[in-house]
Image (spheres, grey):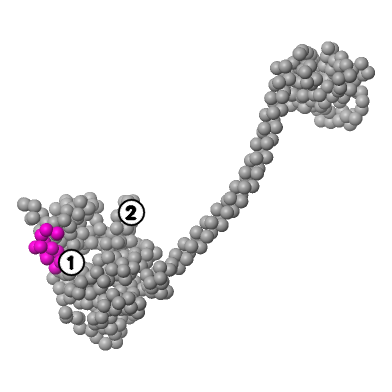
Amino acid sequence: MNAHDWFVENRTAFVGGGLDADEHRSFLEHLDRCPECARAVATLDRELAWLPMGVAPVAPRPGFSRTVLERVLHGRRGWRGRVGAIAAAAALLLAVGVWGVGRQERAALRADLAAAEQRYAALQDTLSIIQGAGRIIHARIAMQQYQGAMLIFDDPVTHRWNVVVHGLPEAPAGEVYQLWFVTETGLRRAAEVRCDGKRPAFVTLEMPDAATRILGAVLTMEAESALTTDAPQGMRLANVEL
Amino acid sequence: MPTPEITSGPRAPLRRVARDPTLRRRLIARDERALGELIDAASPWLLAVVQAMLSDRDEAEDVVMEVYAVVWNRVHETSDDYQGLMPWLLRIARNRAIDRLRRRKRTRLRLERLARTRELGLAAAPPAEPDEAGAPGWHVHEAVHGALGDLPAEQLACVQLAYFQGRTHSEIASELGIPMGTVKTRLRLAYDKLRIALAPIKDWVL
């Protein structure tokens, strides 16, 4: 079989289908230079022209002709085009809504970030006290079921304490752990220490004032109802002397 | 150019359109009414073949709209020695449908579509309703449908795959589980029969 025989054999396939893309392209190129095949293909094309009409007709949907005319003559969109436009508009609204929601989310994230930055700053501050402490005082806690320790980091530069209490369980209902400064004039309420029995509790304290000499600290268990009293009334858990 | 015998009654639109020698010239002259007449006459057939090939009515309508856009914009390129507009429209529609089919790479969907097409299109065309029988070109459909129906089932299957699904010989052989030479033989035999059967209508004009 020579090359032309292949084209002769595949004329019907060229018109009726079956050739792959490369074969089809090759056939098209051949037709440009082979009048015999071109005529034969034209005849075949004419003979099989009505083959698609073997399929039973389908009634167009109402308005189809008008839609086609609008689209062809005026480039207007048909009903599906309008649906597409509506969908695009809806997508735009959705995008605006998402942008709005995104805006709210950004605001919330900014608030979260600010809070995290505050916590980070507090942690840095706490660490700075620990790192810059002029002295560290340790006190063991050993009272009934309360077994732990208290560490006081005294920063003479900023006049602050960082108090770390560990090992203590969560305070019983109606009671709190209360830290007191021991001064020359008596005990002064410092801060509540919230323990959970799992992690150490950290408290950073401003010293009362430069004129007040701090002699030590006391950790007590106080009733919540006694939080306004000026003197400890509950059980003493730790006592630190400077 | 001979035209088919056209009866009176429901086929009046066919006579009006098919025998209108000026339709092409009116389209070239940008006669919008001519385009409307062509749309009314050709749409049922274009939608039928494209929908049968794509199994998707919405997509079929898109393709048919593309066909009319091509006709409107390129009708002036057709030669005076033309067979009528309808074969040209059918060819554009089929080629565009095949293009879309080839874009669909998912073999599973193709096979499903094939199954539906077999039910929808050729071998089991629905009975003619009175309004369908009045559609322009109905007698062409009857002739083609009859010719296809006379093909042996194995040849018809090959024609369906090659002509209406755009499959290659090797794809058909793979799908039907037969040698590629057998596919080519079946197609050649089928088209030889169809050419003979369709000869009486080959010069019909629409």
Q: Position of residue B78 (x, y in %)?
A: 23, 70
**Residue toward you, A176 or B179:** A176
- List the single residue furthest toward the right: A185
| Residue located farthest toward the bottom when viewing the structure as drawn | B8
Q: Quadrant of residue B129?
A: bottom left
Residue numbers of the magenta segment? A32-43
* Residue at the image point whose x is 89% and y is 31% from the top: A225
Q: Main secondary structure of the magenta part?
A: helix
| Position of residue B200 measured from the top left corner of the image (x, y, whole percent) | 16, 76
**Chain letter behind tag 2:** B
Circles 1 and 2 in contact, beta carbons < 8 Å: no
Residue at 72% x, 16% y is A132
Q: Quadrant of residue B61?
A: bottom left
Label 1: how many Cα within 10 Å (few below 14, some 14–19, many 20+): many
Magenta includes A35? yes
Q: Amino acid at mark 1?
A: Asp
The residue lying furthest to the front in this view is B29
Is residue A5 placed above or below A212 in the rendered structure?
A: below
Which residue bears the numbered disc 2?
B104
Per the image, label 1 sits on a secondary structure element best described as helix
Which chain does the residue under circle 1 lie in?
A
Kindly identify which residue carries mark 1: A45
